[in-house]
Image (cartoon, grey):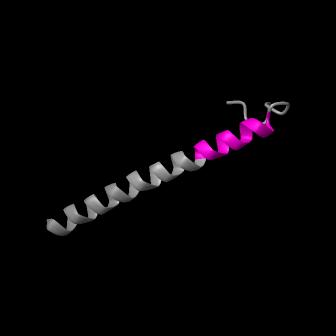
Amino acid sequence: MTGASAYRDALKSFIEGYQEGMQQIMGKKEDSSKAQQEGNTDKNST
């Protein structure tokens, strides 16, 4: 049981760190792409 809970805790912390990293990367990409895409907005329209 303890091995499973330790694995779950490690996996949870890994996922949280991964999501934080992805948010930082996406934020940086948005900032840099906003400056470059003022006349080119149809590529990244969601």
Residue nearest the viewer, comparing 23 with 9: 23
Q: Which residue is depicted at the point 66% across and 40% down?
A: 30
Is residue 13 positioned above or below 23 on the image? Answer: below
Q: Which residue is depicted at the point 58% across and 50% down?
A: 25
Q: Quadrant of residue 12?
A: bottom left
Q: Is residue 6 left or right of residue 44?
A: left
Is residue 24 positioned above or below 8 on the image? Answer: above
User: Which image quadrant: the C terminus?
Assistant: top right
Residue nearest the viewer, comparing 22 with 36: 36
Q: Quadrant of residue 4?
A: bottom left
User: Which image quadrant: the N terminus?
Assistant: bottom left
Is residue 43 positioned above or below 21 on the image? Answer: above
Q: Residue furthest left?
A: 1
Residue 23 picture location, percent across and down: 52, 45
Magenta segment includes 9:
no
Q: Is residue 40 left or right of residue 8?
A: right
Question: Magenta region, mostly helix, strand or loop?
Answer: helix
Q: Which residue is depicted at the point 79% across and 31% down?
A: 41
Residue 10 picture location, percent across and down: 30, 62
Q: Which residues are magenta?
A: 26-37
Q: Residue furthest right?
A: 39
Q: Quadrant of residue 38?
A: top right
Residue 6 picture location, percent across and down: 22, 65
Magenta segment includes 31:
yes
Say how many tags the image has: 0
